[in-house]
Amino acid sequence: MTTKTSASDRPLRADAERNREKILTAAASVFAARGLNVVFDDIAAAADVGVATVYRRFPDKDSLVWALFENAVDEIAELARRANDMANSWEGFVWFLEQALGRLCVNKGLREVIMGAPYAEERMTAAKTRIVPAMMALIERAQADGYLRADVVEADIPVLEMMISSLGGGANEVAPDLWRRYLRIMLDGLMNERPAPSVLPSCPSETVVLEAIRASRCGSPDRVVEP
Amino acid sequence: MTTKTSASDRPLRADAERNREKILTAAASVFAARGLNVVFDDIAAAADVGVATVYRRFPDKDSLVWALFENAVDEIAELARRANDMANSWEGFVWFLEQALGRLCVNKGLREVIMGAPYAEERMTAAKTRIVPAMMALIERAQADGYLRADVVEADIPVLEMMISSLGGGANEVAPDLWRRYLRIMLDGLMNERPAPSVLPSCPSETVVLEAIRASRCGSPDRVVEP
DNA sequence: GGGTAACTGGAGTCATTTACTCCAGTTACC
DNA sequence: GGTAACTGGAGTAAATGACTCCAGTTACCC
């Protein structure tokens, strides 16, 4: 198991460390914009270093993904915990979803990691598991207070997040707040008692919606349109 | 423009016609199961003919997609029209969504076509446009009757369909009815007055949900797991 | 039942993409 | 100023995908 754990053996030389940082920064923005299935050459180009330098520092995509997203996942768990500290349990529940979705919608890489992309899987699964207890507490409190319908379970939350963020991700260049409208509708469906509908934000035009749906590309191919 | 419109010039020979049917049947099931970005070799293999035979009959994927999905799209428009004929406008609205989603969830190719996949685009867009008036009537009637919340617009419907069917498609091998649960929640959010929540079907287990989410793969890569 | 035009299969070509390495040259640091 | 660490990017190898070619088979008209 002691197969040369590189990083910890001795500190990197100054220039190497500088490049490592450049790679991480570049990878973060490339992953956020285009998801995890980008090639190392693109990351290298964005970081303004050679491909070999990327491979030298991060032998495979898993290590890069892990270095970048471990914190992001833990941050979501932290959000759930903070939501639990809020005075009103329903407001806490709503606030958590808004915060988590806000992050997911602008970061395709994070979305893929959370939704189970095949990189650094075991470690990511472990990290995600840390979210569960806080989320469960959040739900139970909102249910106990009579705000949240009783038949919702913890497993429903990632589903709702997936459904909304897959739209939000597609829309985020053309209508970055569109997802809030559908979150609102879902929340109206999740409330225990809801005599009248709440007010919906950002009414969409037909064309914006079609663009958002296409861009969210539920599993469809990317055919490039080079002229 | 008269560049040899093949099919109409003269009838195909009996064996050729037979093969054409085999190709259409095979393509339908391959597209349904694996989406539109399958290679012609796979379709040929499923149809038990050579690749050349497929290319001979359908020079590009657009013509194949069009031949297969034009009817499916029109059928959805027909569903909306039939929903309008139902006595109760809310039941018609719900029935339409259930029918349309039922079809979308089991057919990845149809899902991609509806969501704007880049095949036979212009013609498909035209076909989809035929759905709009019927859907608009459906919405307006349900709103006039006080069932459907007033701030919903026609453009919301494809969004809801996209969100739910992207989950339903991912789940359909492991929990084929899971999508109905989230449709129910959405519908509870779409109702105008809804004092108490309606009863939710198919409560999911954590593991089933995670599998469904991963399989729905909101834009994430397919990394094969060959051992 | 035989001649011929229509049709077939699948091996093969060519182009593109992706993952990863090699090494001649540069740079940090004692 | 010597040397070990580090760098860039051209280059290799393998996989995939789109499409064609042609020797052989088959339907159909007489």
Image: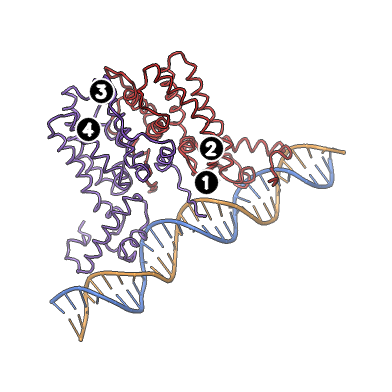
Chain colours: A purple, B red, C blue, D orange
- Which residue is located at x 23 percent, y 61 percent? A21
Residue position marked by numbered label 1 in the rendering = B39
Q: Secondary structure at mark 4?
A: helix
Determine which quarter of the picture holds residue D3. bottom left
Residue denoted by label 2: B124
The Cα–Cα distance between marks 1 and 4, rounded to whole angstroms, is 44 Å
Q: Residues within 10 Å of mark 2 (few under 14, many from 20)?
A: many
| Cα gap from disc 2 to disc 4, whole angstroms | 38 Å
Distance in Å between CA atoms under marks 2 and 3: 40 Å
3D distance between C-alphas at marks 4 and 3: 17 Å
Callout 1: chain:
B
Horizontal and vertical percent for residue A87?
Answer: 12, 31
Q: CA distance from mark 1 to mark 3?
A: 44 Å
Q: Which of the labelled discs sits on residue A94, or is there none?
A: 4
Discs 2, 4 touching: Cβ within 8 Å: no
Give the Cα separation between the discs numbered 1 and 2.
21 Å
Q: Position of residue B61 (x, y in %)?
A: 56, 44
Are dots 1 and 3 on a single chain?
A: no
The answer to whether the residues at label 1 and label 4 have Cβ atoms under 8 Å apart is no
Query: Residue B103: percent from the left, percent from the top?
Result: 47, 28
Q: Which residue is mark 3?
A: A151
The chain letter under disc 4 is A
